[in-house]
Image (tube, grey):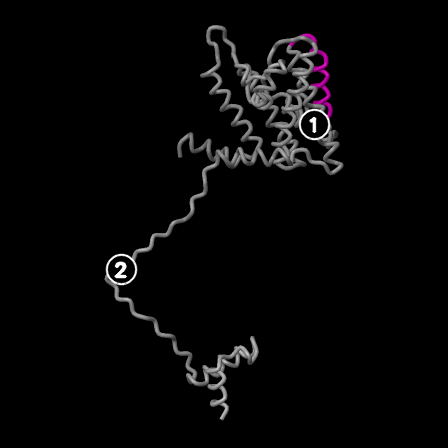
Amino acid sequence: MGLFDDLKLEYKLGGVTQQLIFWNIGIFIVSIILFYNFKGASFSYPDWLALSPDPLIVLSHPWTLVTYAFLHSGFMHILFNMLMLNFSGMLFLTYFKEKQLLGLYFLSAIFAGLVFCLSFFLLGYHSSIVGASAAIISILMAATTYNPRMPIRLLLIGRIQLWHLTAVLLVLDLMYILVENTGGHISHLAGAFFGFIYIVLLRRGIDLSKGVTVVTDWVMGLFRPAKKTPFKKVHRNSNRRMVPETPKSSGKDPKQQQIDEILDKISKSGYDSLTQQEKDFLFNASK
């Protein structure tokens, strides 16, 4: 089995978190080929893929509210995000279903993107954003809201409660919101807010992810191989003589067998269901 077959098997068996990681990494590799500026050592994404703060561009390219969440600005950017996605997805799936995680990923990305566009438009900023961070922190925040005291173990730190980690990440976003990567920090906070609201509504019986999973299942289905209908090949011998089959003998007297069949017919459908020939036969047999 080759490397490509191993990856296909891993994608199929890995679950939705791993599938999202595969999609992000795959798109990142394609992005290097298409959009990486080797002279400037940076990515240059077009407005029809990255999320622009210009409302007119977003209205004409609404899919960018999703595509930006699968694009990254560098190797360290995608490495950190995929590590966090794997970690957050594992925590979320401790309590919820894979379809809910997938729905939350897309919904939080859209919500955070809309908040980013509105805030940047009001602030007069003109920088686009890319990255899965908002969707990932939404998943982490959802798990934290559901069980804030869940024990986790971090390298070099040891055992802490989940809310401690989430609180540190949110405080860092608040501290650096006006220092650098303003759009990224705004989208992170918006994603965290959506993850919190998602769990609040879920506890009231409202699952926002249901409508999204119908669409995502359809999209994912386009990339799954169609199931092949088993085909059985029948060989016919044209030289074989067709001999009519004769009914197998039941061991009964033919007359008695016919009487039994008529009596069964009477028990099921009544005497009036008999033909005149059957009535005459039964009358003669009774003599």
Sequence order check, earlier mark of 1 and 2: 1
- The image shows residue 267, relative to residue 16, as above or below, that is below
Bin the neighbour count of mark 2 within 10 Å (Cα to Cα): few under 14, some 14-19, many 20 and up.
few
Span highlighted in magenta in the image: 160-180
Q: Determine the secondary structure under disc 1.
A: helix
Q: Amino acid at mark 1?
A: Gly
Q: Which residue is mark 1?
A: 195
Q: Residue at x 76, y 37 (%)?
A: 204
Quarter of image, res 95: top right
**Main secondary structure of the magenta stretch:** helix
Task: Give how far across and how far down residue 20 sits, in percent.
Answer: 55, 28
Give the residue displayed 64% in from the left and 21% down from the top. 134
Q: Position of residue 43 (x, y in %)?
A: 52, 12
Amino acid marked by disc 2: Asn
**Position of residue 8 measured from the top left corner of the image (x, y, whole percent):** 46, 33
Residue 220 in the image: x percent, y percent?
Answer: 53, 34
Q: Is residue 90 above or below residue 274?
A: above
Q: Nearer the viewer, residue 111 or 36?
A: 111
Q: Residue at x 30, y 56 (%)?
A: 235
Report which residue position mark 2 lands on. Answer: 237
Residue at 66%, 32% in the rendered image:
92
* Residue 101 in the figure: left or right of residue 255: right
